[in-house]
Amino acid sequence: MAHFNLLQEKILKDGVIKSGNVLKVDSFLNHQIDVPFISELGKEFYSLFSEKKIDKVLTIESSGIGIACLTAIHFGVPVVFAKKSAGSNMDKEMYMTEVMSYTHNRMNHVVVSKKYIKQGEHILILDDFLANGCAIRGLIDLVLQAGGIVEGIGICIEKGFQGGGDALREDGYPIKSLAIIEKMDADTGTITFREGDKS
Ligand code: 5GP
């Protein structure tokens, strides 16, 4: 069985739907990390992007770091995680962008050191969730500021009904999601996945 089906099964078994279209997967991804399971997802990302030249994996703190490491190990490359910064002061050592936080409903400044993304580097962007796409667009912005190349975007759980992933596909980004939720209902606790291709 393909791993993205394993992720769907895990979401159905352990995911908890909260109000505000938030899916909690704290038991294996966002609080406790089920390392053997997440490492299977890392292998899946590797097989999805192994044809690409990847110099670095970029994610955003903190929930993306585990899956980014367990993917980067197969490419033999470093992980860079963008940091959420309290201040908005321009620091000439950093690239900075703004990201609206979906779960906290506030604007975060997100930074990455100029030392760790360089002109011409081929970057694989990874994150745990994709909803409206703000976090991923922020990471793309950081790569472009640095003169890097977005080789691929990998998402563990895309909430397809929020449209961020399809908008990125329409913009031509090579985005692959291991599970795409088409519908979820907090009252009945039901989750429906988009079937077919992973992208
Ligand atoms: P976006 O920026 O695409 O709207 O939201 C993506 C970011 O918000 C992810 O980095 C993730 O941390 C958080 N997020 C969005 N939706 C969910 C959700 O349903 N559950 C969890 N746990 N995090 C989410």
Image (cartoon, rainbow, N blue to C red):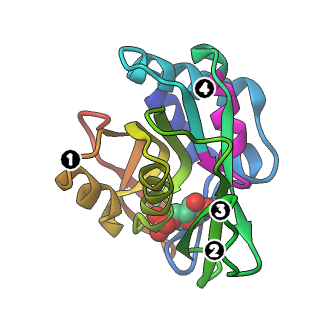
| Element marked by disc 3 | strand
Closer to viewer: mark 3 or mark 1? 3
Residue 198, quarter of the rendered image: top left
Instruction: Give x and y (percent) for residue 175.
Output: 34, 42
The answer as to whether callout 3 falls within 8 Å of ligand 1 is: no
CA gap between label 3 and label 2 equals: 7 Å
Assess whether mark 4 and mark 2 are in contact (beta carbons under 8 angstroms). Answer: no
Instruction: Give x and y (percent) for residue 77.
Output: 63, 22
Per the image, the residue denoted by label 4 is 71
Closer to viewer: mark 2 or mark 4? 2
Assess whether mark 1 and mark 4 are in contact (beta carbons under 8 angstroms). Answer: no
Residue sitting at x 54%, y 72%:
99
Dot 1 alpha-carbon crowd within 10 angstroms: few under 14, some 14 to 19, many 20 or more: few
Above or below for 139 versus 1: below
| Element marked by disc 1 | loop
The segment highlighted magenta reads 59-72
CA gap between label 2 and label 1 equals: 26 Å
CA gap between label 2 and label 4 equals: 26 Å
The answer as to whether callout 2 falls within 8 Å of ligand 1 is: no
Residue sitting at x 76%, y 29%:
35
The amino acid pointed to by label 1 is Gly
Residue sitting at x 58%, y 42%:
117
Membership of 71 in magenta stretch: yes
